[in-house]
Structures are given as C-alpha cells and as structure tokens.
Amino acid sequence: MARKTFFSFHFERDAWRAGQVRNSGLLMGDKAGFIDKAQWEEVKRNGNAAIEKWIDKQLEGTSTTVVLIGSETAGRKYINYEIEQSAKRGNGLLGIYIHNVRTQNFETDTKGKNPFDDWYRTINGRKVYFSEVYPTYDWVMHDGRSNLGKWIEEAARKAKR
C-alpha cells in the first residue's frame, strides 16, 4: 500500500541527498514534502507564517513523516516544527541518516545528531525521548533503496495509521 509520506530535511544542505531517496522508485503516488528550489525560495520570502502554513498543508493526509538526517538537520527551526506537527497529528515517524549518500561530486558527509534526541513525552512521570520510540536507519548501511517502503509501512502500522 502506498503511503502519503512527508519528508523532512535541511533543504539547502541536503536537497541532493533527499532527491536520491525520493527518486529511489519505491514510493508510488504523491511524495509530499518535496519542493523545488524556486518554490522554496518563494515560500521563504513570505516569512515564518507562510513556511509553517506550507508545512501544515503538506502534512495534510499524510500517515508518516520521514526525517532525512544529514550533518546539520537536528535543531533546525523548521525540522523541529515538522517533527512537532507530525507527532501532534499522530503520524508514524522514522529517521534515515543520509550522510553516506554521495552527492553529485561523489562526496559523503559527517553523521549528524539524531533530531529525535531533542523531543520527549512525559509518560508516568518519566521522560521518554522520541529516539527511544521512533527508529532510525542508515540509507546506505541498511539498504534504504530496498527497505524504505517497509520502514514507512512499519511506522504507519505502529502509529495505527
């Protein structure tokens, strides 16, 4: 079953790597969360409220959110907003490290911090970090090309979506 999935990533730094995931050919239908540079620049020019409105619109109807983790993903304002809104909507969440995906110049990057380490819920008086609940994978080491559909389906099932 194809899932409408939102992809969260640091656009300026990781658009090429995110494109490799997007173009892996495993997802059918609408790939919410991707925007071309010209559109992104226009959305950014309209300010914070416009960006958050765009994110909210892209999240409509999604069952899962995939956070593509590059070297500078964690702690970014809009990545945090996307994670927060996805959790509020009850989306299944998962992270995929993309630092080992080669750029058009055949370069890899340093591994970034898991953004799920910054988020928690308090359950029975205990902080339960998102990183304890939501899985992360490495696109290259865990063969994302073959497994992305399974990972998304598992995250949706776990979230009862």
Image (cartoon, rainbow, N blue to C red):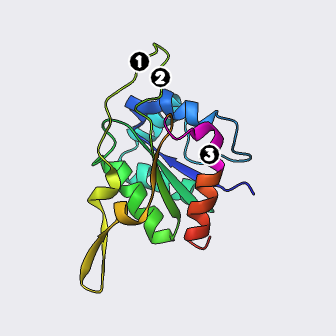
Which residue corresponds to mark 1?
107
User: In the orientation shown, which residue stands out farthest toward the bottom?
Assistant: 124
Depth check, mark 2 against mark 3: the one in front is: 3
Question: Does the magenta portion include 146?
Answer: yes
- Counting residues from the start of the chain, the first of labels 2 and 3 encountered is 2
Which residue appears at 74% of the width and 47% of the height? Answer: 29
Which residue appears at 51% of the width and 29% of the height? Answer: 38
Q: Estimate the x, y position of residue 118 in percent, counting from the top left.
A: 27, 58
Estimate the spatial distance between the alpha carbons at disc 3 and disc 1, rounded to whole Å.
23 Å
- Counting residues from the start of the chain, the first of labels 3 and 1 encountered is 1
Instruction: Pick the quarter of the image with the N terminus.
Output: bottom right
Element marked by disc 2: loop
Q: Amino acid at mark 2?
A: Arg
Q: Quadrant of residue 159?
A: bottom right
Q: Amino acid at mark 3?
A: Asn
Relative to 57, 149 lies left or right: right
Q: Amino acid at mark 1?
A: Glu
Relative to 122, 22 lies left or right: right
Q: Quadrant of residue 12?
A: top left
- Counting residues from the start of the chain, the first of labels 1 and 2 encountered is 2
Which residue corresponds to mark 3?
147
Q: Estimate the x, y position of residue 34 in percent, counting from the top left.
A: 56, 40
- The stretch of residues the image draws in magenta is 141-149
- In the foreground, 61 or 124: 124
Q: Residues within 10 Å of mark 2 (few under 14, many from 20)?
A: some
